[in-house]
Amino acid sequence: MTHDVTAGPPPAGAAASPAKTDAVVRAQYEAMPYPPRDPAEEAKRLLVGTPSHLPEVNHYLYAGRRDFRQPFRALVAGGGTGDACIMLAQQLHDLKCPAEVVYLDISTTSRAIAEARAEARRLRNIRFLTGSLLELPSLGLGLFDYIDCSGVLHHLKDPQEGFDTLAAALAPEAGMGVMLYGEYGRSGVYPMQDMLRTLAPVGTDHAARIAMAKRLIRFLPPTNLFRRNTFLNDHLSGNDGALYDLLLHSQDRAYTVPQIADMTRHAGLRLVSFIEPIRYEPSTYMSDPQIGRDLAALPYLERAAFAERLASNLTTHIFYATKAGYDTVARPEDTSAIPVLREMDPAELAQGLKPGTPLVANLEGFPWRAQMPPLAGQIVAQIDGRKSIAEIYTSMAMRGGLPVWDEFHQQFEQLYVVLNGINHLLLRFRLGE
Ligand SMILES: C[S@@+](CC[C@H](N)C(=O)[O-])C[C@H]1O[C@@H](n2cnc3c(N)ncnc32)[C@H](O)[C@@H]1O
C-alpha cells in the first residue's frame, strides 16, 4: 500500500503487508527513526556520503558517461530519515536533471523527518511512499536507473528475497548502491544481542531494553569480544536509537565478501566495486613481497575477501552492483576523462602533498601510508572538475618544466589509485557541454 500524501499518522492500512514485513522491525523504526536527523540542520549543510553520491554513481555504474540532462529515476529503498534521498535529490536538482527520486520505507516517523528535510530544501523531485520494498512488484513504479539500499537488507527475514526484488526493478543497464553489515568488523555484536535477548526479551518495552543494554555494557569483563572491538562506536554516541540499532535489533545479520558476491550473483547482478576500493586490497595492509605477489595474481573478489579477513575492521560493506554485462567503471586510461575531487579542497590538498612525503589515511584504525608521485601536488592543484586529464597536462606544460606525456600520465595514474582508493577522486566525461 502506498501513500502520496504528506507525513502524519499512518492512515488505516498503511502498514506494509504483515506477512512480508516484520512488525517488530517496523515498531523499532517507528519509535526510533534511524539515523537521528534534525531537519533544521538542512539550512546549514548538505550531508553527503556513500553510496549514492551522484558523481560516484556515474563513475561506477555509468562509466562516467551518464547524461544527467536526460530523465533519471532513482529509488531509495528503506530511505530512513532521508540521508541518501536528500543527497541524491539535491545533486540532481543542482544539475537541473529531470529526475524523480522515490523514497520508500515502512516507518512513517522516519518518512516524516525525511519529508521535513526535503521541505527545508524546497526539493520537489522526491516522491514519498510508505511500504515495504518487498511490495515493489505490486506498486507499479516502473523501472529505475539507480537503486540505493543502505543498511536495510540485513534487517529482512530473507535478505536475498529483498535483493532479488530490488534487482528486478532495475532498468536493463542500471545498478545499485548497497550497504550491508560486515561480519568480522562486527565481531562481538551478535553475542551481545543474544545476551540482551535473554536479559530483556524482544517485545519488552524499548526503554527497559535500552537501560538493560547500558547496564550490561558497564559490567562487561575486559575479555569480552564486544568490549575488545574498538571499531564499533554507535553505542558511544549517546543516542539511544543508535544503541538500539547496534545491540537490540530483533533482526540483523552480517556478511562476508564471498557471501555478498553470492547474493549479488543470485540477484542477476555483477559486483562492480567495494568502497573505499583501497580497503579491499590486501597490499594496503602488508608489505611482504612474496605474499604480495601471490595475492596480486588473484581475481578481484578473492583479493577483496582476503583483505577483509586480513584487516578485520570492516564493520560495513558498501558496494555497487550492475545489471549491465560490460565494464561500467570510468577508467583513467582514457585521457579525456575529467577528474572530480570530492569533499577535498584541491588547493589545500595540493599544499599538503610535498614530494617525498607520503599521504596518510586512517582506515578505521589502520594508518595507511601511500607514496605519492612527485607531481601529485601540481596535478591536484589543476583538478577543477572541468579540465580533462589531457587538459591538465597542457595547462601544466604551459607553466614549463613538465616531463614527457608518458611520465605525466604514469604519475597521474599513481595519484588516481591513491585518491580514488580512498573515494575522493572520481572520473566523468564531457557530454556535449
Ligand atoms: C538502519 S535504517 C537505514 C536508513 C537509511 N537507508 C540510511 O542509510 O540512512 C533501516 C531502514 O530500513 C527500513 N526498513 C526495514 N525494513 C524495510 C522494508 N522491508 N521495506 C522498506 N523499508 C524497510 C526501516 O524502517 C529503516 O528506516
Image (cartoon, rainbow, N blue to C red):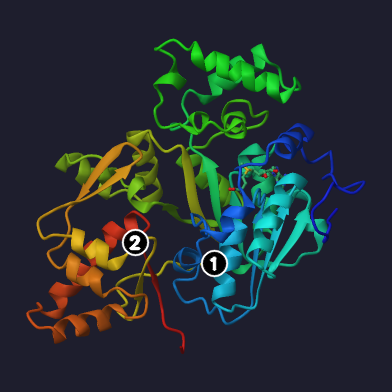
Point out residue 34 in the picture as x, y percentages from the top left corner: 63, 41
Q: On residue 344, which mark appears?
A: 2
Q: Label 1: how many residues lie within 10 Å, few (<14), some (14-19) or many (20+)?
A: some
Q: Label 2: how many residues lie within 10 Å, few (<14), some (14-19) or many (20+)?
A: few
Point out residue 385 in the picture as x, y percentages from the top left corner: 37, 75
Q: Circle 1 — which element?
A: loop
Q: Amino acid at mark 1?
A: Ala
Q: Residue furthest bottom?
A: 432
**Along the viewing direction, whichever of 20 and 196 lies nearer the viewer:** 196
Point out residue 269 in the picture as x, y percentages from the top left corner: 56, 57
Residue at figure coordinates x 27%, y 50% from the top left: 297
Residue at figure coordinates x 32%, y 64% from the top left: 345
Left/right of residue 256 with respect to residue 101 in the rendered view: left
* Quarter of the image where ligand 1 sits: top right
Q: Total marks drawn?
A: 2
Residue at figure coordinates x 75%, y 22% from the top left: 205
Q: Circle 2 — which element?
A: loop
Residue at figure coordinates x 39%, y 60% from the top left: 343
Left/right of residue 16 with respect to residue 51 in the rendered view: right
Q: On residue 297, which mark appears?
A: none
Q: Residue furthest right?
A: 12
Q: Is residue 290 above or below residue 188?
A: below
Mark 1 vs ligand 1: CB under 8 Å?
no
Measure the alpha-carbon separation of dots 1 and 2. Answer: 31 Å
Mark before the other along the chain sequence, 1 or 2 = 1
Badge 1 is on which residue?
324
Q: Can residue 82 be seen? A: no
Q: Amino acid at mark 2?
A: Met
**Along the viewing direction, whichever of 427 and 42 lies nearer the viewer:** 42
Q: Is residue 104 above or below residue 259?
A: below
